[in-house]
Image (spheres, helix red, strand yellow):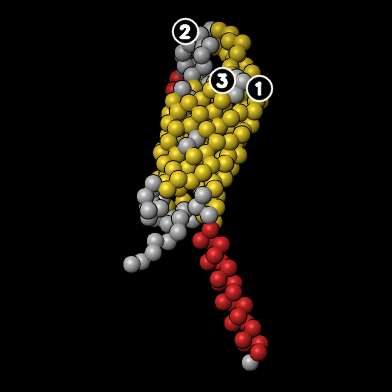
């Protein structure tokens, strides 16, 4: 009888701790697509603690037409068939760790602001040493080499989050990535999936 009692006590305690943990900790995935002076996207793992503190571990990838691309540059047939994926781009890849504050916008918790700022490590690639080659309708009329640099960055990415259900929602907001080499500024929208908020209390 004592064994049954202690097993029941253990199960009740575990269930209580489990419920308490997920009342204070929301862990979810988010993904956004951005437009601005670069085009790109972000994937992040997010953790909200006690509906106040937000932590983010994210990856941002951006691309844009090179600023130093020759005016007479043109693609070939193969590049067109590859939908432009073989073209040269200015690339910025950023790994970030962020902290933010959660500001509720409505009492039910289905709209909130996530005011996030963080530090990041950015890998930057830019095409250089352009050399013209004989025109060939199959391939591009220039060759190039990528110049690679790594920099520390500051990332500012406040968002409006709309977890209309406990497990799925939408995001919208601007992003700013600043480093020694350049700046990415844009605005984007995306989705969230995971444990996003408390369950609504039933009347």
| Element under disc 1 | strand
Expressed as whole percent of the image width and height from the top left, the position of residue 185 reads 48, 26
Q: Position of residue 72 (x, y in %)?
A: 47, 7
Indicate the position of residue 123 as horizontal and vertical percent values.
Answer: 62, 27
Above-or-below relation of 60 to 167: above
Query: How many C-alpha atoms fall within 10 Å of the one at disc 1: few (<14), some, or many (≥20)?
Result: few
Q: Residue furthest left?
A: 203
Name the front one of labels 1 and 3: 3
* Label 1 vs 3, first from the N-terminus: 1
Mark 3, other Cα within 10 Å: few <14 / some 14–19 / many ≥20: few
Nearest the viewer among 141 and 11 is 11
Residue 70 visible? The answer is yes
Q: Which residue is mark 1?
A: 149
Q: Which mark is residue 71?
A: 2
Quadrant of the snapshot with the C terminus: bottom left
Q: Secondary structure at mark 3?
A: loop
Q: CA distance from mark 1 to mark 3?
A: 11 Å
Label 2 crowd (10 A; few <14 / some 14-19 / many >=20): few
Please tell me how many numbered marks the rendered image carries.
3
Relative to the observer, which residue lies in front, 135 or 194?
Answer: 194
* Gap between marks 1 and 2 measured at Cα: 25 Å
Q: Between tags 1 and 2, which lies in front? A: 1
Residue 19 image offset from top left, x and y in percent: 53, 66
Compared across the picture, whether 172 is left or right of 87 comes to left
Mark identifier at residue 182:
3
Whole-angstrom CA distance, mark 3 to mark 2, is: 22 Å
Q: In the orientation shown, which residue stands out farthest toward the bottom?
A: 1
Q: Quadrant of the N terminus?
A: bottom right
Q: Residue at x 53, y 22 (%)?
A: 183
Residue visible at 60% across and 24% down in the picture? 179
Can you see residue 191?
A: no
Number of the label disc, if any, that sits on residue 173: none
């Amino acid at each position: 009888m004592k064994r049954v009692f202690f097993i029941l006590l253990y199960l009740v305690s575990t269930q209580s701790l489990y419920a308490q943990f997920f009342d204070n900790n929301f862990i979810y995935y988010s993904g956004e697509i951005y437009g601005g002076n670069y085009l790109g996207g972000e994937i992040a793992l997010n953790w909200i603690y006690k509906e106040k503190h937000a932590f983010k571990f994210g990856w941002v990838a951006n691309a844009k037409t090179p600023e130093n691309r020759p005016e007479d540059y043109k693609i070939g047939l193969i590049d067109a068939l590859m939908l432009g994926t073989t073209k040269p781009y200015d690339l910025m890849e950023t790994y970030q760790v962020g902290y933010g504050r959660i500001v509720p916008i409505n009492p039910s918790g289905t709209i909130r602001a996530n005011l996030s700022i963080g530090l990041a490590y950015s890998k930057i690639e830019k095409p250089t040493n352009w050399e013209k080659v004989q025109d060939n309708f199959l391939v591009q009329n220039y060759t190039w080499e990528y110049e690679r640099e790594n920099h520390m960055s500051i990332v500012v990415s406040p968002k409006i989050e709309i977890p209309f259900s406990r497990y799925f929602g939408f995001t919208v907001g601007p992003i700013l990535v600043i480093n020694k080499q350049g700046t990415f500024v844009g605005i984007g929208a995306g989705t969230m999936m995971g444990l996003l908020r408390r369950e609504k209390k039933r009347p």
